[in-house]
Image (cartoon, grey):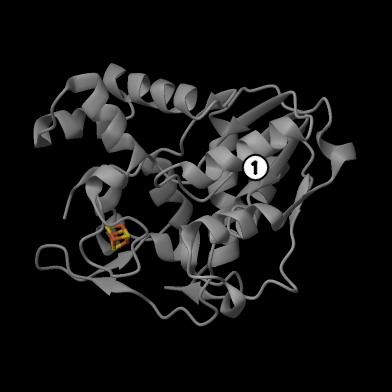
Amino acid sequence: MVMTPEAVITLVKPGEKMKICTFLWVYYGYPSSSYEGISVEQMRYNCGKLLARRDNVAADTVAGVPDSGTAHAVGYANESGIPFSRPFIKYTPTWPRSFMPTIQSQRNQIAKMKLIPVHDLIKGRRLLLIDDSIVRGTQLRETTEFLYRSGAREVHIRPACPPLIYGCKFLNFSRSTSDMDLITRRIIQRLEGRQNEEILQEYANPDTDKYHDMVEAIGREMNFSSLRYHRLDDMIQSVGINPDSLCTYCWNGKE
Ligand code: SF4
């Protein structure tokens, strides 16, 4: 995942009120930065902590998808008591972005080559892996397969934010170009055969059966041993500022 070293506070205007993009803390803020007095690194520890409090999975080790998942994983490990480790390392020194080929298949190949397994930390282990989010799911599925090939017994996935159900319409950094790029939307389409606002709202609510059916279907499709997302209320609590100041549109469709 790409980080912006000097991310500036990102204000968007859903409806008439200026709000701050919550992804600033979850994903693209630099770890040493603070926004609205809230440290990016600390917020990610909070996310991991609240994820762990709702979880009961049996795992041998907690890891983060580098780089943005790492701090969330530290928070999870500290709260759960499951040891943190780095079962794979992202190798970057000789693959700076400027050398990246323009052809997508070659870029995918290089992305795979950048993940170096630490076999002793993977073989026969039950891994709990935290990523900042799941957009299309392609990369995380490949990472999971890479861990199975490297000998992992189980790979449990815990995204540090809720399912992305709405594409961002406020910022141009968005990693999806269409709502149907989102894995949630593809699964909802498959489950329902149609989509409208009422249906989407049911799937955005973590207390509904539909939400649970969607999460189960995503986990199955991605071949995860289990999948559990961060809840929106917990994510907002992880930031700790007035929820009215935060944009959460891509998770709940509310402006
Ligand atoms: S919709 Fe999501 S990505 Fe876009 S500004 Fe709001 S919180 Fe950020």
Q: Name the residue carrying label 1.
A: 76
Q: Relative to 205, is 4 on the left or the right?
A: right
Residue positioned 36% across, 21% down in the render: 212
| Residue 176 position within the rendered picture, expressed as x and y whole percent measured from the top left | 32, 55
184 relative to 208, above or below: below
Q: Which is nearer the eye, 158 or 25?
A: 158
176 relative to 140, above or below: below
Residue 50 shows in the view = no
Q: Which is nearer the eye, 31 or 173?
A: 173
Q: How packed is label 1: few (under 14 Cα within 10 Å), some, or many (20 or more)?
A: many
| Residue 10 position within the rendered picture, expressed as x and y whole percent measured from the top left | 34, 74
Residue positioned 54% across, 25% down in the render: 223
Q: Circle 1 sits in a helix, a strand or a loop, which is it?
A: helix
Q: Relative to 189, is 64 on the left or the right?
A: right
Q: Relative to 240, is 125 on the left or the right?
A: right
Q: Quick check: which quadrant has ligand 1? A: bottom left
Residue 22 shows in the view = yes
| Residue 99 position within the rendered picture, expressed as x and y whole percent measured from the top left | 61, 77
Residue positioned 16% across, 22% down in the render: 193
- The residue furthest right is 120
Which quarter of the figure is the N terminus placed in? Answer: bottom right
Q: Relative to 87, is 79 on the left or the right?
A: left
| Residue 63 position within the rendered picture, expressed as x and y whole percent measured from the top left | 70, 44
Picture quadrant of residue 130: top right
Q: Which is nearer the eye, 84 or 37?
A: 84
